[in-house]
Amino acid sequence: MTQRLWALFRKELRTLFASPIAYIVLTVFVALSGVYFFQHLLNYNRLLFVFQSGAISGGSFDAGTIPLQVNSLNDLFIPTSNDLSLFLLAVLPLVTMRVFAEERAQGTDELLLTTSLRPWEVAMAKHVTTYLFVLLMLAVSAIYPAAVVIKSHLGMEHLLALYVGQLGYGMAVAAIGLACSSLTQSQIVAAVLAYAIPFLIIDFTWLHPVLSQGVAQVLDEFALQSHFDSFARGVIELRRGLYFGGIIALGFTVSVGSMEFARAR
Amino acid sequence: MGAKIEAKAVSKRFGEHVALAELSLEIDQGEIFGIIGPNGAGKTTFLRILTGYWLPSSGDVYVDGHSVVKNRFAVQKQLGYVCEQPKLYDDHGVRTFLHMMGALRGIKRADLDAAVERAIERFGLGEVQRRRIGVLSKGFRQRVSLAQAMIHDPPLIVIDEPTVGLDPRQQIELRRLIQALGGHHTVLLCTHQLREAEVCCDRVALLDRGHLVQIATAQEMEAGGSLEALFLDLTQRSEGQG
């Protein structure tokens, strides 16, 4: 079984990196996250400079003192976390849309599923490969922030927690995309669904006007954003991990189920 | 020696449409068995059920006693499948692809390289073994498809429309290859080419709109008029009913 899974895994890697989309997505993601991180860093440094130099004084500020509101958490880590989550949401469907849909459209699933491979093995290889790609994206994008944070002693643990959160979030978004891809032959349909579902569940405040307070509070617990926010604050909580794990498990189950369903149609 | 196949009242329905209606047949070990019929006769549907890709709506197929419904993985281990219009990974090299398919079909790591070499030699893929599948001609793609299906030397080989798109010389080569498989392997050949069925097969089943119309042996095909006559008669009757 290990040999077959390894062969499948290598096939998925080969297919992923044979496509220009992987390189484009990686480049765009790393470039955007780098540019925006440095923008936040620049703004943070400007604020520090302004307050330290005493350029702002009077009112609620003491000259030469940095106010509590100006700190690396508020001005660097949380904005970076928000940016990364948005970029992941924007680019991951482009990676996941083809994973199952292309296989089905080209009929190569027939080749795989008549070789005594279990559907869960096929799905496992596809999911693991995609999650490793998410890890690669985040790892490459983390190089510059890590260098800056280490050099300036801004709190490596914050950055680490932020990226752990983004990894969980990215894997959850990818799992949703993979589940969508497994439901259709059309990459366009898969991409549209993979954009729509995370956008709907990222934050449920848009539903608050029509919900009672109790229901809204319960629903907010299932919002994607509420779960990665705490990581950006440097807190790694088990329940947040379980939430992302639940979405990943659900995406995997849908992927396997769709193959079994297609067999019985 | 090949595998024995028994189809027992196999049906497949897609909503109201009956693609296969209670098909029952037996194929002996080492036999080359053809399935012919007009478009929509249920040929590919039967192959997809036999290979475990689709579940039948009712009935079952047994390969050496293993039920495709209850234990499709045991059935799939015994077969090699050449899909209609070779479905291959165009971004893979020929050798890489065969290596992968060998691993997926359970060939042990220590034997894999030798199995790939044998397949490359047997199907004349030496000159293209380093090329990407996507740039190969139809003939070579078909050969790659056959090579992946037979890399683990299965007792049952299922081939769907093997000569579609091939030039006459490639068709003749492929027919010779299929003929050579008989005896050692059971071959189930689904084709539109009546000549191919006549030349290659020990017996041929004629399907029409999901129903088994007739099974003819090679002798019957020779003695009782050609398969072509049978086929024309069938299609004319179908048109008359339609």
Image (cartoon, coloured by chain):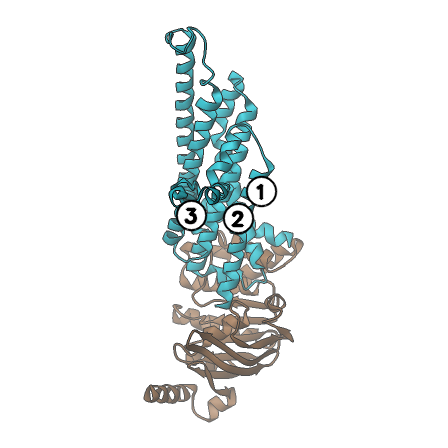
Chain colours: A cyan, B brown
Q: Give the residue type at disc 1.
A: Leu
Q: Position of residue A186 (x, y in %)?
A: 38, 56
Q: Residue at x 37, y 53 (%)?
A: A189
Location of residue B59 in the rendering, given as x and y in whole percent from the top left corner: 56, 78
Q: Which of the two residues, B98 or A140, is positioned nearer the viewer here?
A: A140
Q: Earlier in the sequence, mark 2 or mark 1?
A: 2
Residue occupied by mark 2: A127
Left or right relative to B64: residue A68: left
Instruction: Estimate the spatial distance between the alpha carbons at disc 2 and disc 3, rounded to whole Å.
Output: 18 Å
Q: What residue type is labelled 3?
A: Ile
**In the picture shown, does residue A212 fall above or below B169?**
above
In contact (CB < 8 Å): disc 2 and disc 3: no
Q: Which chain carries label 3?
A: A
- Mark 2 and mark 1 in contact? Answer it, CB < 8 Å: no
Which residue is labeled 3 in the image? A197
Q: Nearer the viewer, mark 2 or mark 3?
A: 3
Local SS, label 2: helix
First along the sequence among labels 2 and 3? 2
Packing grade of label 3 (10 A; few <14, some 14-19, many >=20) is some
Query: Which residue in the protein does label 1 denote?
Result: A242
Q: Is mark 1 on a helix, strand or loop?
A: helix
Q: Which residue is drawn at 45% across and 18% down?
A: A69
Q: Nearer the viewer, residue A134 or B151?
A: A134
Q: How crowded is mark 2: few (under 14 residues within 10 Å), some or many (20 or more)?
A: many
Which structural element holds mark 3? helix
**Does residue A48 appear left or right of residue A114 in this picture?**
left
The disc numbered 1 marks a residue on which chain?
A
Give the residue at the far bottom of this rendering.
B224
Give the spatial CA distance, label 1 vs label 3.
Answer: 19 Å
Residue A58 placement (x, y as % from top left): 38, 7
The quarter of the image holding the N terminus of chain A is bottom right
